[in-house]
Image (tube, coloured by chain):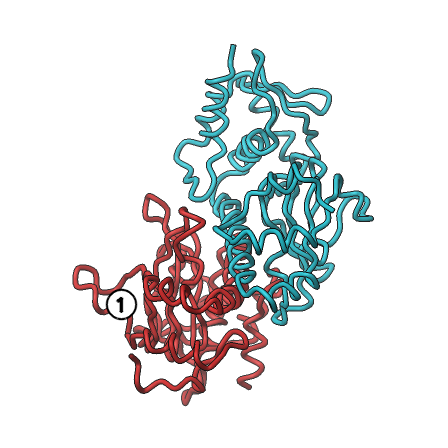
Amino acid sequence: MIPNDIRSSVVWPCILSEGLTNALLDKAQFFESFNEMGYNKSGSVPKGVVYVLSGATAVYFHSSPKDCSYVGLLASTSWLGASGFQDNLFQDLTIEYEPIVDLSFVLFNYSDIEDICERQPECHKWLFSCSRQMSFNLFQFNFLQNYSVKQRIIYSLFYLLAKTQTPLKGSFPSLAVSQTVLAIASGVGRPRVNQVIKGLSDEGLVSFESRKTTFLDLEGLAQKLDGIEFTIYDPVSIVLTRYQKDKP
Amino acid sequence: MSTSIQISTIQWPCELSDEFKYDLLKCAKRRTLFEQNDSNPSYNRPKGLVYILAGAACFYFLDKNSRTIFGGLISPRDWAGAAGMKGGYNHAPGIWMRPIQPLDCLFIGFDDVERLSQSHLEMYKFLYFANQEIQYKWGQVQLMLNHNKQQRVAYALIELLALQKSYIDTYPRIPISQHDLGLACGLSRPRVNQVLQEFVRAGFISLERKYIGIVDQSRLEAEIDDVELIFTDPRKRLRKLD
């Protein structure tokens, strides 16, 4: 049974009847950690729709050991896995995710969803909206492929700051993220991350030590993303607005 | 209503009642899609669902500097546009389409889709599965961004080749301009030209007026050997044609 505070915290992707949301939540399971699913670090997405309550994960498409491709980051309030429901098109295709900040989430099993779809056709409206939301979110990351590695890494930093609700109070906000994790989050190699971080440190924008990035000049860092279109999700204005409000 | 179209001639993305299919087709307009916009006859951003009966179009996204950033093809039996539905998400990326082969399609405006969804809850089942199919196509298009320009052009040429039903010459000839090929693979015309010249020198293709001849299909196909064909492999469709 899902605790009441969790039930009420779910942000549904579209307007749905209470009858449907209750039917879905009555069958759902709550997991405090990704590891509870029986995975150590990474693995296939569970056979169901996942609602991320907190944390962040890198997402990969995977069809064979040869074909595995990074697609982006998903974090709190994201819906994952709706595209895999009754999917006869490409059964061999799976989505893998690698949590970079451990996930707490709600899981809606496909078998339960199937039952609910039979009784409440509105369930397809929910699936359609979840699936569309995920594809738009990932679209933003693919869009960034047109920009430099440096900009992709900076975008990931802002995304993680915005989505993990990192406190921005204090003179210099910081984010607990190692270079390895930042490499996974940005879909680039660790040596390249190291190179970029060093460059940003030399410019006095960030400092990086002991698996922690400290933001010395958030506004200056944001300027590095000038000209990028945040078609779907703009973490920079979210972070800067919060920063202006919170800064001492 | 598109009177000449029967329910049975459409490839539906999932099991649906005949009543729903009939009502949906009642709203459908048969169009060549993009010829109706007088100010800009070649381009359009359809505000509705599109079902391709015949022909092909490229779909692409432009950044604010009008630079093409993604590009792909839609072809017969594809349902496109479900992701652009209003409601629940206000930031749907703008998609542009341009026919590259004479197009015959059905168009169902979003207003009609929304109106029908009030009386038919099955509408969302239809939208969900219609969107699923096109998502695979888009997924592959987005993955192509990870690859070099030669691979992107070769991939688009092979996809176009798979649309050719037959050919009477010694080798297949694809009717497409370099500009349209650029839209289909998300590259600028000069970059497409650069790649095509390389392919000509390597003996894969020939450049003819309004056509690209595929002189050495197997070597062109080999260009995408290292491409992550996670969602779809156009070479499989070519094998089916063979």
Q: Position of residue A222 (x, y in %)?
A: 47, 26
Residue at 68%, 46% (x, y): give it: A106
Amino acid type at mark 1: Phe
In the displayed structure, would residue A131 be above or below residue A75?
A: below
In the displayed structure, would residue B22 be above or below residue B130?
A: below
**Chain identifier of the cyan chain:** A
Q: Please report, as a chain letter, where disc 1 is located.
A: B
**Which residue is label 1 attached to?**
B34
Left or right: residue B89 versus residue B232 is: left
Decide which of B187, A162 is in the foreground and name it: A162
Residue that protrudes farthest toward the left in the picture: B38
Q: Quadrant of residue B164?
A: bottom left
Q: Position of residue A68 (x, y in %)?
A: 67, 55
**Chain identifier of the red chain:** B
Q: Position of residue A94 (x, y in %)?
A: 68, 60
Decide which of B233, B54 is in the foreground and name it: B54
Residue that protrudes farthest toward the bottom in the picture: B168
Q: Quadrant of residue A74?
A: top right
- Residue B154 visible somewhere in the drawing: no
- Residue A33 visible somewhere in the drawing: yes
Q: How many numbered marks does the figure carry? A: 1
Q: Quadrant of residue B36?
A: bottom left
Residue that protrudes farthest toward the front in the picture: A19
Decide which of B78, A196 is in the foreground and name it: B78
In the displayed structure, would residue B170 be above or below residue B31?
A: below
Mark 1 lies on a secondary structure that is helix
Residue at 71%, 58% (x, y): give it: A47
- Callout 1: few (<14), some (14-19), or many (20+) C-alpha neighbours within 10 Å? some
Left or right: residue B26 versus residue B159 is: left
Q: Position of residue A107 (x, y in %)?
A: 69, 50
